[in-house]
Image (spheres, rainbow, N blue to C red):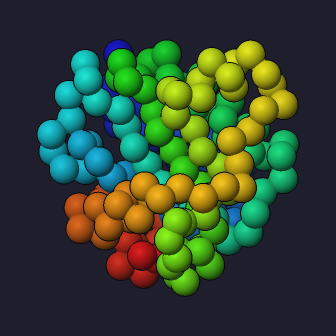
Amino acid sequence: MQNIKTILDSIVESYKTILKDSLIGIYIYGSLAMDCFNPDISDIDFLVVVKENLNANDKRKLVDILLGRSKDGPGKGLEMSALLEKDVKNFKHPTPYILHYSNAYKATYEANHSYLCEDGEDPDLAAHITITRARGICIYGSSIEDIF
C-alpha cells in the first residue's frame, strides 16, 4: 500500500484539474480523520463539494481516478461522495449526492464504463457531514466551518 498522503495528494491534484473552478473543497471524515485508521480494515472516506452539477464525462473521470488509485490504497478501498454546495448549505435529510464511489460499486464501475452511481439521496450522509463538522480534515479548498 502506498503512503496515504501520496494517494490523497494525487486525488486532489487530479480533481483540481478536472473540476477547475467548480471545486470548493475536499474533506476527509471517518477513521482517518478520527485517528483510528487501520489500513487492513479501514477505507479512506472523503466528501467533495462542488458549485454545480457535473456532466457525465467529468463524473466518470472522477470515478476513473479512484479506480486507478484503489489498487494502491487500503484493503477496504476509497469512499467518495460528491455534493453540491447548495445541498450542504441548505441541509436536508436524506442528503442528495451527485456522485458516489465505494468498493461496493467498484466491480460495476469496472465492468460498465457508462455506469454512474449518481443523482441520488443517502441517509448516511447526515452522519458523514456531522463527523466532518466535528472531526473532519480539509485537504483542499474552503474551510469546514465555511462550507458545513
Residue 40 percent across, percent down from the top left: 25, 19
Seen from the viewer's position, the closer of residues 64 and 122 is 122
For the N terminus, the image quarter is top left
Q: Is residue 124 left or right of residue 96?
A: left
Q: Is residue 110 visible?
A: yes
Q: Splitting the image into 4 quarters, where does residue 67 fall?
A: top right
Residue 56 percent across, percent down from the top left: 83, 46
Q: Is residue 59 above or below residue 74?
A: below
Q: Is residue 145 above or below residue 67?
A: below
Seen from the viewer's position, the closer of residues 107 and 85 is 107
Residue lying furthest left in this view? 36
Question: Which residue is at a point 54% across and 50% down the rendered structure image?
Answer: 81
Q: Is residue 2 visible?
A: no
Q: How many marks?
A: 0
Question: Which residue is at a point 75% across and 63% down the rendered structure image?
Answer: 53
Question: Which residue is at a point 20% across and 28% down the rendered structure image?
Answer: 38
Q: Is residue 89 left or right of residue 2?
A: right
Residue 5 percent across, percent down from the top left: 35, 36
Question: Which residue is at a point 43% across and 26% down the rendered structure image?
Answer: 77
For the C terminus, the image quarter is bottom left
Q: Is residue 75 left or right of residue 83?
A: left
Residue 82 percent across, percent down from the top left: 59, 55
Seen from the viewer's position, the closer of residues 119 and 71 is 119
